[in-house]
Image (cartoon, rainbow, N blue to C red):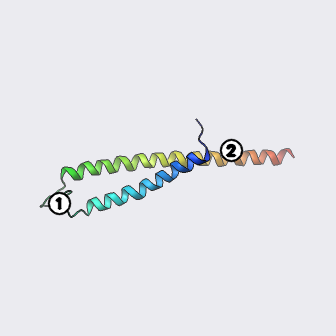
Amino acid sequence: MKLGRGPSWFLLAFGVWSWFIWISFLRNLYRDGSGLAFDADGDPTGYFWVHLTLTVVSFLLGTAIGVIGFRSLRVLRRENGDSAGQQRGSS
């Protein structure tokens, strides 16, 4: 399967967006002062563990999607460079 330039950029942007969003979410979860993430003794609650798991899984999936987009763009760039070199060489 070959991806075009548009979908490749979309996947890369999604990966970057995932890094920004989920790192921000994790920081906010850790700093939670509402009592949802940590009990009165400062111990993590079930809410914290569920959302930490969600954050880690989403971060890893976003990273994998971004890597797919990045690799696809590298292949497209390499193919465009090869075809330009072949056109110049045949003249």
Residue 79 is marked as 2
Task: Assign a secondary structure to mark 1.
Answer: loop
Residue at (23% x, 53% y) in the render:
48
Local crowd size for mark 1, using a 10 Å CA cut-off: few (<14), some (14–19), many (≥20): few
Residue drawn at (33%, 51%), measured in percent from left and top? 55
**Along the viewing direction, whichever of 8 and 78 lies nearer the viewer:** 8
Report the mark closest to the observer, 2 or 1: 1
Residues packed near mark 2 inside 10 Å, few (<14), some (14 to 19) or many (20 plus):
few
Q: Amino acid at mark 2?
A: Glu
Badge count: 2
Q: Are marks 2 and 1 in contact (CB under 8 Å)?
A: no
- What label does residue 43 carry, if any? none
**In this rendering, would 15 be left or right of 24?**
right
**What residue do we see at 21% from left, 51% from top?**
47
For marks 2 and 1, give the CA distance.
Answer: 54 Å
- Residue 62 at x, y percent in the picture: 43, 48
Identity of the residue furthest to the left in this view: 41
Amino acid marked by disc 1? Gly
In depth, the one of 4 and 44 nearer the eye is: 4
* Image height of 28 relative to 79, above or below: below
Where does residue 45 sit, x and y in percent of width and height? 18, 53
Residue appearing at x 31%, y 48% in the figure: 54
Question: Could you say whether the residue bearing mark 2 is in a helix, strand or loop?
Answer: helix
Q: Position of residue 20 (x, y in %)?
A: 42, 59
Which residue position is annotated with label 1?
35
| Mark 2 or mark 1, earlier in chain | 1
Side of 3 relative to 24 (left or right): right
Please provide percent x and percent y for residue 59. Answer: 39, 50
Q: Quadrant of the N terminus?
A: top right
Most extreme residue toward the right is 91
